[in-house]
Image (cartoon, helix red, strand yellow):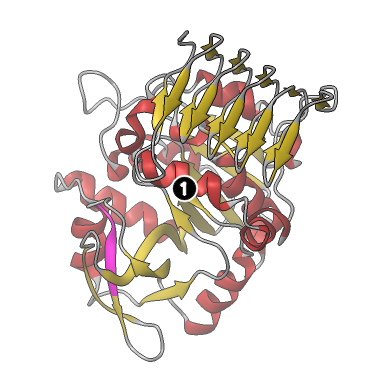
Amino acid sequence: MRANNVLGLIFSNTYDHYLNELTAMRSMGSVPYGGRYRLIDFQLSAMVNSGIGKVGIITKSNYQSLMDHVGNGRAWDLSRKNGGLFILPPFNTSTASGIYSGRIEAISNAMDFVSHSDEEYILMTDCNTLYNFDFAEMFRQHEKTGADITIAYINGVAPKIVELAELETDDGNRITGISRSRSGVESNYAINVYLMRKALLERLINEAMSLGYHSFTMDILLKNIDKLKMYGFKAPGYVRMLDDMQSYFEANMSLLDSDNRKALCLSQPVYTKVKDDVPAIYGLNSEVKNSLIADGCVIEGQVINSVLFRGVHIGKGTVIKDSVLMQNTYVGDNVSLNCVLADKDVVIKPGKVLSGDKTFPIHIGKGIVI
């Protein structure tokens, strides 16, 4: 299987409701992460690094920020005459609002794009999972096993996402059983990365729409488990699925571990929209320990075990611990922040004290002044 014969399809809004605080004004794909990235960067980069040259991004709502970020795909070498990057806006005539509900309707909404693509295979992913592995390994397994559908999975404690598929596999990794995942139970659960022939997907979606099906897991995968050869592909390396604000906070903090940072960000290049800015400026009495500091930051106080995005200002006498501060957050003098997750453009006035816990960080919404 040639990678340039695979069409990439990314769902930018899947599971938005699990991170309501961050997705109220943006899609899941455009949620900032790790001081410089957006979540969609990891899916786009993994596809490009694997040789995929045509990618469609299915949108649903709040996708202006996403469009601004991905642009014409130049940062991922997807600004091309042949192939390239395509934004697929929501519209479905089966619903009064014109906006799809569920993965089946989302794919049906994009079926014209899929049908008119020349690629023989299709790879579908979501944006709420962090990973950076080479899809070429998955392609090789798919071809070697003669699978109809290959589903990437990991073994671990299942997240709170009830729509996930829990997989039972035999010694050869063929899927013998599918059920809804059980939150908090250790199992093999799918990370919603699917590989199959484009013609097969078209047939399955058309059948599902004609029968009024809604669940991709239960109505398509489970009901065809005896008719199709489905195989699991165990995703290698760092894989983390976001299912609430706590998991998002922990995912950011996990990058302070150099092993996690190397596995996720350095095992293969992760491309993102580049914004030229001045280097971070450190004041005479500043102190930074075990933190990620993006360019454009001004640090005049203490920053310990924290992640600071571009343009963050930390005032004199201020102490920041175990916190994540997004782009252009301004923290005044003599402030104390502990376990705080601040969205973009937050202003914290001098003398404030905010303290959460690693198991329950304080969240400050975008543009709020405290």
Q: Is residue 2 left or right of residue 296?
A: left
| Image quadrant assignment for residue 304 | top right
Q: Amino acid at mark 1?
A: Glu
Residue 98 in the magenta stretch? The answer is no
> Which is more toward the observer, 247 or 226?
247
Quadrant of the image occupied by residue 258: bottom right
Helix, strand or loop for the magenta stretch, by majority: strand
- The image shows residue 291, relative to residue 265, as above or below, that is above
Could you tell me residue 134's position as x and y percent?
Answer: 64, 64
Image quarter hosting the N terminus = bottom right
Instruction: Look at the numbered disc 1 and give the secondary structure of its residue.
Output: helix
What percent of the width, then of the height, locates residue 181? 23, 62
- Residue 196, how many percent across, how many down? 45, 63
* 29 lies left or right of 301: left
Q: Residue furthest left?
A: 211
Does the segment drawn in magenta span residue 165? yes
Vertical side of 50 occupied by 297: above or below: above
The structure residue drawn at horizontal position 59% and vertical position 76%, both measured from the top left corner, is 140
Q: Nearer the viewer, residue 347 or 198?
A: 347
**Quarter containing the C terminus:** top left
Q: Residue furthest bottom?
A: 171
Q: Is residue 232 left or right of residue 287?
A: left
Q: Residues within 10 Å of mark 1 (few under 14, many from 20)?
A: some
Q: Which residues are magenta?
A: 163-167
Q: Tell whether 50 sits left or right of 177.
A: right
At 71% across and 62% down in the image, what residue appears? 267
- Which residue is disc 1 drawn over? 250
- The structure residue drawn at horizontal position 48% and vertical position 15%, both measured from the top left corner, is 352
